[in-house]
Amino acid sequence: MDYKIVKIENPDGHNFIMGHSHFIKTVEDLHEVLAGASPTLKFGLAFCEASGPCLVRYSGNDEELIELAKNNAYTLSSGHLFIIFLREGFPVNVLNAVKMVPEVCRIFCATANPVQVVLAQTEQGRGVLGVVDGFSSKGFETPGDKEQRKKLLRDFGYKL
């Protein structure tokens, strides 16, 4: 077995969700959940089929985000992995709905941070061992940092 680290290409810093599922139906079910979440949400999603023709299946309502999802999924080429890129919405707005899709087995990350995916490569194919999401901690928040955090949440409309 070989290990490989693959960086998620996300030049504009879009939020994205990456996970694992178990069936080709994932593409249509995720599309329906995302399209129903908000009339302004823009998204692109791709899914690595792990049997039969082993194609990258894809969908969405934003061509740029669809291409971003397709290219990242193909670079990862890990069985039954899916990746969703978002615009005009955050993962927190759709994450529970995505998790409730019957085919979804797990979520690896939901972030806009730089991400590295740790893969295992065998004779059969690839699997995700984990992700490195963002950077290491540099210290503890100060009272000023707490105020900034609280302000940000209120600016986003998540807290009153």
Image: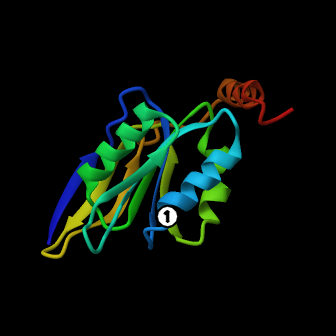
Is the residue 100 above or below the residue 138 in the image? below
Task: Give the x, y percent position of residue 10.
Answer: 37, 34
User: In the image, is 131 to the left or to the right of 52?
Assistant: right
Q: How is the image coloured?
A: rainbow
**Quadrant of the frame with the N terminus:** bottom left
Is the residue 12 above or below the residue 97 in the image? above
Nearer to us in this view, 30 or 90: 30
Task: Give the x, y percent position of residue 6.
Answer: 25, 49
User: In the image, is 109 to the left or to the right of 142?
Assistant: left
**Quadrant of the frame with the C terminus:** top right
Q: Secondary structure at mark 1?
A: helix
Residue at image location 65% in from the left, 49% down from the top: 94
Q: Which residue is mark 1?
A: 26
Residue at image location 56% in from the left, 52% down from the top: 31
Residue at image location 31% in from the left, 67% down from the top: 79
Q: Quadrant of residue 69?
A: top left
Nearer to us in this view, 147 or 158: 158
Is residue 99 in view from this perspective? yes
Task: Give the x, y percent position of residue 34.
Answer: 61, 48
Nearer to us in this view, 90 or 87: 87
The type of residue carrying mark 1 is Thr
Q: Residues within 10 Å of mark 1 (few under 14, many from 20)?
A: many
